[in-house]
Image (tube, helix red, strand yellow):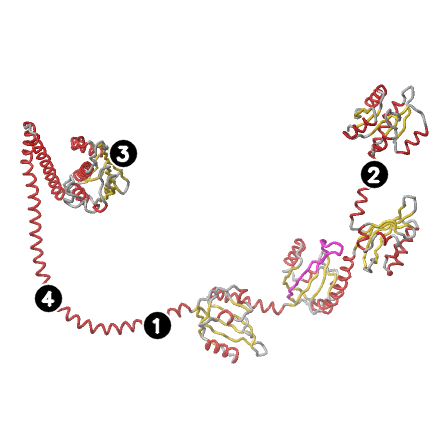
Amino acid sequence: MIHQLLIIENNDTTFKHLRKSLEEDDKSFCLTAAHSIHDAKERMEQNSFDVIIADHHPDDYDGFDILKIAGSVPVIFVTGHEDVAVAVKAMKLGAYDFILKDKKNNFLTMLPIVVKKALQSKLDQQLLKTTEFRYKSLFENTNDLIQCVDEEGVFLYVNPAWLSTLSYDSRDVASLRFTDVVHPDYTKYIKTNLSQLKKGKDFIHVELNLIGKHGEEVFVEGNIHNDYTVDNKKSQQAIFRNVTEKKLSQQKLEKSENMYRLLVEESSEIFYETDFHGNFTFINDVTADMIGFTQKELLGKPFHTLVKEEYAPDVITFYQDQFKKGLQSTYLEFPVKTKNGESIWVGQNVRLLYKEDDTKMIKGFSAVARNITERKKYQMELERLSLVVSKTDNYVMITDKQDVLEWVNQAFLDMTGYDLDEVIYKKPESFLRGPNTDKEKARKLTETVMVYGKPYVGELLNYTKTGEEMWLSMTVTPIYDESGGISNYVTIGNDISEKKRAEKKISEQNRKLEEKNKQIRQTKTQLQETNKKLKSINNHLEELVSQRTKSLRTTNEKLVDANKELDLYVYRASHDLRGPLASLLGLAKIAQLESKEPVALEYFSRIEDSTLNLENILRKLLSVSKIRKHTVSYGYWPVEDLVIQINKSYRNFIEASNVSITFNYEEDAKIFSDHYLILNIFQNLIENAIYFRNTYPEFKSRVRVSFEQNEKQQIIRVWDNGIGINEIYHEKIFDMFFRVSEKSRGNGLGLFIVNLALEKLNGTVTVESEPNTFTSFKVTLPAEGIDAGYY
């Protein structure tokens, strides 16, 4: 630990000698030099010092002035002027020591020793002040009453707790003696005890009653011991604890115990107390009389010696558990043995007893017990009965003579929905009856059983806990006691709600059946008359149907023949016309090559277009005829082959139309369908997209064709960015020869052919379109027959 030393010395040579002497003696000394009082003040403002070493005659001050600013820091004067009077004055003014310089510098050897003593003295003073402060704080802040009196009993000191407890102030105490605040009943007691102190006893322990300023009584207990004042006079110090509440509690407890003991002695119930080991310490007369032993025979013996042998282990364990867990109160029923060998059942309440000076230390227990032998017999009988009735589906109720419920079986609780604690000790009518209960039947039940004392057998509408109606059948039997009076009523029955509902339903059905039968009888007569008319009408209708059937058969045969002829005509006409049309188309092309007249060329061009259009119509009519006659033949067809075939057939048409067509499908994808029909579907949808493209200059017409499939279906989509189709025509565009306007470039057969082919394939087609933006056709085909083995 570093010790800070301030040396006030204006002679540098002397300062060097002092420094050398101190630092060589103890490395913990840290020296600071000051050449004057003014310089010393500045050093002390900047730092704190443990010891000050000062010359008695510095240049700028009286040497004693340093004592005024040193405070609690020890000051050691070192001077070369030998003057005993000055040294005495310095010591009186508070200097720690006064050292004279000698010519041989022997004072330098003495100085470190004096400095160390000064440091130790300072440390001792600090410890003393700390101790004094702690004791003073303890006395001033404790709740105990502390006082000090002289040999005459005059108060020398009292702490704040003493003043506040007795309601005095410090001015009152100055005129009081100790005996003035002692209760008269304790004056002799306190004088006797104080005399023992005067005889040389170190201390005495007293319990007495003090009187406050306003006459209030304060019970205290504590020690008084001899002490001495500063001037070595004898005094007596006392520390008292306020035990007023404890004293009052003890008085109340004693009074309560006396009353309790009186009640115990006069009680008609068993009462006893034991020590911690369960040995009897007290037994009232009732206990002794009931079991036949005298109090003398039982006191000091374990209580469990009276318990029947087969129950003793469980009883001992039960009360050991109470002791371990600190359970304040318990209840237990068990049989005890009387002196003559009989058994008595007792219901026993046990409370733990604690030592008076320790509320956590158990000293034993007290027991209050009642003879419950008769109740136990009844309970055992009832338990046997309960075991029987608990197994039955019938409900069982036992009520007392006032019809208050004492017991029910589980079947009753299940039927009604109540818990046991919701119904026990209540009258059944208070929770079973409801708005539709027959009051007359309920009155008759009560009168039969409770007035005449006869059994009652009947049915009554009751209610469950949730308010549902519940029909109960019941047999109510009065139970008579030995004196011939009714003691209980036993009710046995079952829930017949289902039966009642069935009866009600049957009754309602019978009523409805009767009404129906009446209606049937009335209707039967009407039907008989109507049947006669119907029979006549039926005969006439059969004749008409026979005639009409014959006519329709003839007409149908004619239609079949006509259709065959029509298909043949269309086929032959289309086939026969294609030859002349081809010739006409060839002549038109030759004429365009040979003629140079613009007007003639325009006519020949139009003839060529009309011829091509007519040829296209004939081609599609032939397709219609072929599709109708076509027999579907399913197979797996590579989509890639179909695309190649379409591009080959429509290459010139696609190039002439300046349309970009893209196909999107999985590599090696195959479509399950009829080759002829699916090719017609692809061709006509693509042809339709090209026909109705947007013909604006510089417009880039696009057609996208895609194919996808899953386990359930195959889907073909054909999308174009052409002129679109107004929504009002979406349902008509698949009709034969339907065109949106006369200016339409199509012939009204392409989409009809698509729909016709899909009917053969059990497929569907839908359309989405927005005029002048896009058109999208979605073809959906069943995927039956798709198998990985085909790929």
Residue located 77% across and 59% down the image:
250
In this rendering, the label closer to the viewer, 2 or 3 = 2
**Residue indicated by mark 4:** 540
Relative placement, left or right, of 30 versus 385 is right
The percent position of residue 693, horizontal first and vertical second, equals 20, 36
Per the rendered image, the range of residues in magenta is 345-365
Residue located 7% across and 40% down the image:
574
**Residue indicated by mark 3:** 666
Which quadrant would the C terminus be assigned to in this image?
top left
Q: Nearer the viewer, residue 605 or 94?
A: 605
Residue 5 belongs to magenta span = no
The percent position of residue 309, horizontal first and vertical second, equals 65, 60
Residue 358 belongs to magenta span = yes
The percent position of residue 390, horizontal first and vertical second, equals 50, 65
**Mark before the other along the chain sequence, 4 or 3:** 4
**Mark before the other along the chain sequence, 2 or 3:** 2
Which quadrant would the N terminus be assigned to in this image?
top right
Residue at the limit of the structure toward the bottom, as seen here: 452
**Residue indicated by mark 1:** 507
Mark 4 vs mark 3, CA separation in Å: 67 Å
Main SS, magenta region, reads strand
Q: Is residue 209 visible?
A: no
**Mark before the other along the chain sequence, 2 or 4:** 2
Mark 2 vs mark 3, CA separation in Å: 104 Å
Secondary element type, mark 2: helix
